[in-house]
Amino acid sequence: MTIKIRLPGGVLKVKQRHELRRREHKGEVPVWQFGKYFVIWWPSTIPDRPSKSSNTDEELEMNLPSTGEST
């Protein structure tokens, strides 16, 4: 049971713990707990889904093709 309220500048959501997304669990967006409910503010400046270009350097190194040269 997720409640979404669209407001100027973002979306206010109310969820239970099992409904939280990874970014909400990690605190990448503001999250407040009231009893068993969580209030989450998703500003419109933060995309709802992370872009594929936001990989970390470690992930990029793992995805590079091997040239056969040892370092």
Image (spheres, rainbow, N blue to C red):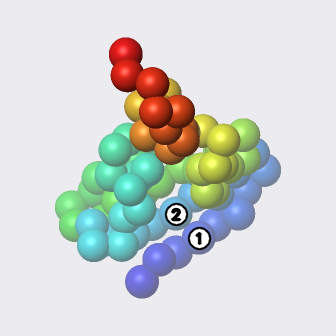
Quadrant that contains the C terminus = top left
Residue 17: image location, x then y, percent: 27, 67
Residue 4: mark: 1
Residue 35: image location, x then y, percent: 21, 61
Residue 9: image location, x then y, percent: 75, 45
Q: Which of marks 2 and 1 is nearer the N terminus?
A: 1
Name the amino acid type tagged 2: Lys
Which is more toward the observer, 64 or 39? 64
Residue at the front extreme of this rendering: 68
> Is residue 32 visible in this depiction of the protein?
no
Q: Check whether the beta carbons of the residues at disc 2 and disc 1 lie within 8 A of each other.
A: yes
Quadrant that contains the N terminus = bottom left
Name the secondary structure under disc 2. Answer: strand
Which is more toward the observer, 71 or 54? 71
Name the amino acid type tagged 1: Lys
Q: Name the residue under label 2.
A: 13
Mark 2 → mark 1, Cα distance in angstroms: 5 Å
| Crowd band around label 1 with a 10 angstrom C-alpha radius: few (<14), some (14–19), many (20+) | some
Q: In this view, does 52 lie above or below 1?
A: above
Q: Would residue 19 be found to the left or right of residue 51 on screen?
A: left
Q: In this view, does 11 lie above or below 71?
A: below
Residue at the top extreme of this rendering: 71
At x 37%, y 22%, the residue is 70
